[in-house]
Image (cartoon, grey):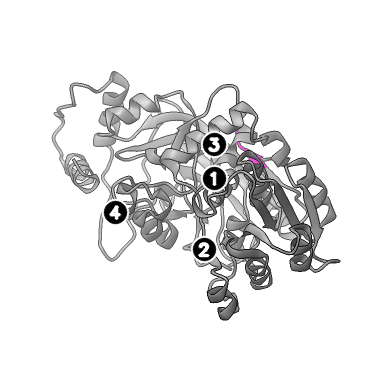
Amino acid sequence: MGFNRYNKLLRTFTSRSTTTTTYPSSSSSFYRNQWRRMSSSPSPTTDDSKTVSFSTSSYHLNGGPSYMRGAVFWEPNKPLTFEDFQMPRPKVNEVLVKTKACGVCHSDLHVLKGELPFPSPCVVGHEITGEVVEHGPLTDSKVIERLPVGSRVVGAFIMPCGNCSFCSKGQDDLCEPFFTYNRAKGTLYDGETRLFLRGSGKPVYMYSMGGMAEYAVVPANGLAVLPHSLPYSESSIIGCAVFTAYGAMAHAAQVRPGDAVAVIGVGGVGSSCLQIARAFGASEIIAVDIQDDKLEKAKMLGATHVVNARSEDAVAKIREITGGMGVDTAVEALGNPKTFMQCVQSVRDGGKAVMIGLTLAGAKGEIDINHLVRRQIKVMGSYGGRARNDLPKLVKLAESGIFNLQAAVSRKCKFEEAGKAYEDLNRGSIVGRAVVEIM
């Protein structure tokens, strides 16, 4: 049964006033109890011209809490506030995760500064770890078997629907509903958010799963099991910093052993690119930044050469290191028109310039067209990895020690310090990645 038919069936059940319900014979007692709670709760009111709003009645999670806290963004350049939310309810093939940790990413910061358009109020945070506490009604039994209640999990920021034309071809990173609904409207793929303020019932939108909260609803395709050998806090960065780096290196650049790679901007994502390039066997790995402390750390994470672009001509230095040739792949991890140009100019003839840094909406990068044409330069964007296939691989890289999570995370913060962490990120005072520990 397709995704839309599942939701239609679910709405039909929840709108009935009868007290007799037939449950799938394969459902566990836990699942049946949850279904009773869902079908006995007031149904959402729907109006195609309005955002769906749930009733403010309490919903207790397995006899536990009926509400949670989350960090809310209201408007650009205003501090986050901590608000009480109704307990989020997962729907079909969705999982409710008790959040343990959430990474602090520049993509969130772009939203907080108003540089990327996104609905507000919203909860940002999109690289999480946590524990599975509940499945949505009518969730596929294979999902429940793969991610049973009590599982330790890590979430990817691109949460593929699994059904669209791109997902059916394995291109989870181009998932149509993810961009149409989540990135454009701040909802999941039925067009509804799962976050509502306690008391008022006001809807709050979701940047990915809205990870800066005590609980998060995540589509099951965006989750992988996290082994007990990996800690919750450091592992949260797998879902974006590592995930984005892997997508750039594996799918866009297709880095091969012996390749020369340059990474321009070695913050959280850029420094992860260094580790992935090393894991793929790159022979020369050149880190470019304007902060010496980041460049020093880059040496620990796989950089064979470092270039301070504040004091040196980055393009000339990269060509000098590579004997005048340029690198096979250059990665731009800042989202800046100047570094965009540097990235293109740094690659050898036939090389690849991969852009992974987000920037101001509508910003443009310049390219020398004749150089692009005559030297067959390939310029491409890369937004992230492919969750269903890549996320389990990245967990194994971390578990084996090939990717060093501890070295990549430079700061851990308390939940109440989330706003301060974004302020420090904006000032450039976080070397590597900061992680907010929530529970």
> What residue did someone put label 2 on?
380
Figure label count? 4
312 left or right of 326 in image: right
Callouts 1 and 2 close, C-beta under 8 Å: no
Callouts 2 and 3 close, C-beta under 8 Å: no
> Which residues, given as a range, are shown in magenta?
435-439
Label 3: state its secondary structure.
helix
Dot 1 or dot 2: first in sequence order is 1
> What residue did someone put label 1 on?
243
Q: Categorize mark 1 by other alpha carbons within 10 Å: few (<14), some (14-19), many (20+).
A: many
> What residue did someone put label 4 on?
165
Residue at 42% over, 62% down: 184
Q: Amino acid at mark 1?
A: Phe
133 left or right of 356 in image: left
The percent coordinates of residue 152 (x first, y second) are 50, 27
Dot 2 or dot 3: first in sequence order is 2
- Quarter of the image that includes the C terminus: top right
| Residue 238 part of the magenta-drawn span | no
User: Marks 4 and 3, Cα distance to the nearest angstrom?
Assistant: 25 Å
User: Marks 4 and 1, Cα distance to the nearest angstrom?
Assistant: 22 Å
* Nearest the eye: 285 or 113: 285
Q: Categorize mark 4 by other alpha carbons within 10 Å: few (<14), some (14-19), many (20+).
A: few
- Quarter of the image that includes the N terminus: top left
Dot 2 or dot 4: first in sequence order is 4
Callouts 3 and 1 close, C-beta under 8 Å: yes
Label 2: state its secondary structure.
strand
Q: Amino acid at mark 4?
A: Ser
Magenta stretch: helix, strand or loop mostly: strand
> What residue did someone put label 3 on?
394
Dot 3 or dot 1: first in sequence order is 1
